[in-house]
């Protein structure tokens, strides 16, 4: 099982990432200071580091500098509210593999994590294709097929379909779908999940996604 170190001192964000990654099949650990993040990263026990810049103890840039100075080639995705160009350049030139600004959607972070791990290891951490009955999703190209026929899905429709396929047969609440597909700053009162389930039913088949009254949705 691949292991991801999450370095972020905001419990709301680190908890959101950790919950999502565990659901996706990753082992996780959270560090809340830059000092702890560097110490854990240097153990060699982790396959990837998600690193916030604004950390107590030492900031993310210093953690990254010391990590690379040790000779570690572990993939690092910098995660921060700083979106100015000079911060992006500084992170990438300092040895980061990717840079994602807050707020972010979990599906985008997950896609970047999988991409970096595939580049780091010829054996993909997760399968490139997901399937359930006659529905198949190609994670690499973000395309869907039903019975061999390609179906055009928007990025958000694909992310929702991926979540349902990964948990086929399980009931997913609206709150779970909002959190995993729309991000940590979702509005719990929003009906956007219901709207997008409707879109998927139109494209993938009306009877494919079951409504479990008062709970959520399940892929049949």
Image (tube, rainbow, N blue to C red):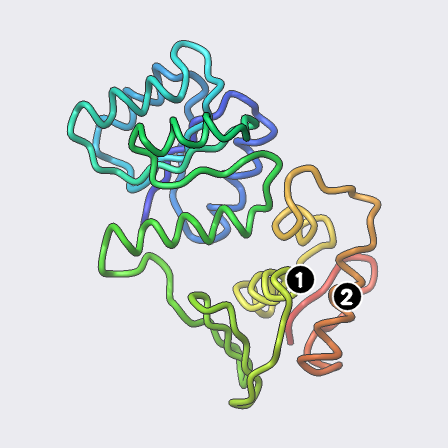
Q: Nearer the viewer, residue 205 or 140?
A: 140
Q: Position of residue 40 (x, y in %)?
A: 29, 25
**Residue 193 drawn above or below residue 200:** above
Quarter of image, res 140: bottom left
* 126 relative position to 173: left or right: left
Q: CA distance from mark 2 to mark 1?
A: 7 Å
Q: Residue at x 71, y 55 (%)?
A: 173
* Helix, strand or loop for disc 1: loop
Residue designated by label 2? 212
Q: Residue at x 38, y 29 (%)?
A: 91
Q: Position of residue 98 (x, y in %)?
A: 40, 41
Q: Nearer the viewer, residue 81 or 129?
A: 81
* 185 relative position to 9: left or right: right
**Residue 128 drawn above or below residue 47:** below
Q: Residue at x 15, y 29 (%)?
A: 71
Q: Quadrant of the C terminus?
A: bottom right
Looking at the image, which residue sits at the far top?
A: 57
Q: Residue at x 49, y 18 (%)?
A: 54
Q: Contact (CB < 8 A) between labels 2 and 1? A: yes
**Residue 120 drawn above or below residue 6:** below
Looking at the image, which residue sits at the far left?
A: 71
Label 2 neighbourhood size at 10 Å, few (<14), some (14-19), many (20+)?
few
Q: Nearer the viewer, residue 144 or 36?
A: 144
Q: Position of residue 41 (x, y in %)?
A: 28, 28
Q: Position of residue 200 (x, y in %)?
A: 70, 72
* 214 relative position to 88: left or right: right
Residue designated by label 1? 171
């Amino acid at each position: 099982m691949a292991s991801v170190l999450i370095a972020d001192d905001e419990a709301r964000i680190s908890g959101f990432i950790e919950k999502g990654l565990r659901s996706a099949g990753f082992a996780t650990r959270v560090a809340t200071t830059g000092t702890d993040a560097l110490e854990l990263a240097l153990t060699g026990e982790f396959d990837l580091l998600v690193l916030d810049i604004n950390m107590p103890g030492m900031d993310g840039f210093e953690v990254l500098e010391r990590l690379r100075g040790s000779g570690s080639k572990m993939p690092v995705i910098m995660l921060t509210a700083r979106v100015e160009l000079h911060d992006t350049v500084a992170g990438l030139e300092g040895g980061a593999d990717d840079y994602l600004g807050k707020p972010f959607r979990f599906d985008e972070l997950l896609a970047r994590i999988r991409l970096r791990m595939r580049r780091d290891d010829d054996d993909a951490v997760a399968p490139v294709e997901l399937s359930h009955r006659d529905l198949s999703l190609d994670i690499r190209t973000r395309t869907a097929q039903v019975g061999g026929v390609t179906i055009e899905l928007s990025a958000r429709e694909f992310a929702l379909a991926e979540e349902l396929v990964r948990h086929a047969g399980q009931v997913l609440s609206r709150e779970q779908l909002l959190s995993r597909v729309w991000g940590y700053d979702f509005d719990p009162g929003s009906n956007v999940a219901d709207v997008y389930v409707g879109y998927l039913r139109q494209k993938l088949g009306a009877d494919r996604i079951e409504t479990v009254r008062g709970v959520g949705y399940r892929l049949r």
